[in-house]
Image: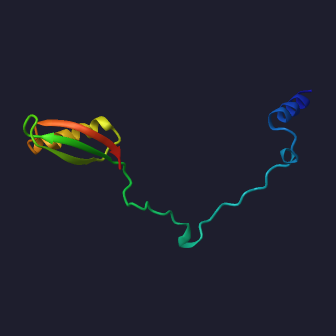
């Protein structure tokens, strides 16, 4: 009785299939052949993400502004902004405005 119930459940889940009754053939272990099977490296050569932060900075209030570009090697936009602002303050910019944070 339980065998019939089990068979009905298999048919309900997987449908009628001639492959369901035949076990899959044994697979042979894939052996890499020669240098063609070696994994390829990334095209850019870098394996870590970067964010590009663009900041408009000025040393005087409503004075001449400069656009600074900072590349941060992090995924967090908040950390990238903080690092970019710290770098701009080292250059003695006082007034900072974040223009954009985009992945590179």
Measured along the vertical axis of the image, is residue 16 above or below residue 49? above
Indicate the quadrant where residue 5 lies.
top right
Counting the numbered discs, the total is 0
Q: Quadrant of residue 31?
A: bottom right
The residue at 23%/48% (across/down) is 69
Indicate how the structure is coloured in the image.
rainbow
Q: Residue at x 82, y 49 (%)?
A: 23
64 with respect to 8 (left or right): left
Residue 8's spot in the image, x, y percent?
A: 88, 31
**Left or right, residue 54 beside residue 91:** right
Where is 6 relative to 93, above or below?
above
Give percent across and percent down for residue 44: 39, 60
Where residue 76 sits: x, y (%)?
33, 38
Quarter of the image with the N terminus in it: top right
As displayed, is residue 18 above or below residue 42?
Answer: above
Q: Residue at x 56, y 72 (%)?
A: 34
Q: Residue at x 22, y 40 (%)?
A: 83
Viewer-proximal residue, 81 or 27? 81
In percent of width and height, residue 64 lies at: 10, 43
Q: Is residue 42 left or right of residue 69?
A: right
User: Would you say 36 lies left or right of 42 here?
Assistant: right
Judge by depth and name the residue closer to the eye, 37 or 23: 37
């Amino acid at each position: 009785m339980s065998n019939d119930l089990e068979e009905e459940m298999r048919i309900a889940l997987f449908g009628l299939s001639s492959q369901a009754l035949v076990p899959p053939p044994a697979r042979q272990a894939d052996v890499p052949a020669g240098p063609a099977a070696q994994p390829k490296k990334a095209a850019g050569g870098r394996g870590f993400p970067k964010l590009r932060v663009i900041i408009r900075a000025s040393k005087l209030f409503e004075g001449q502004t400069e656009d600074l570009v900072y590349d941060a090697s992090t995924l967090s936009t908040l950390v990238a902004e903080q690092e970019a602002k710290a770098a701009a303050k080292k250059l003695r910019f006082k007034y900072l405005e974040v223009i954009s944070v985009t992945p590179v």
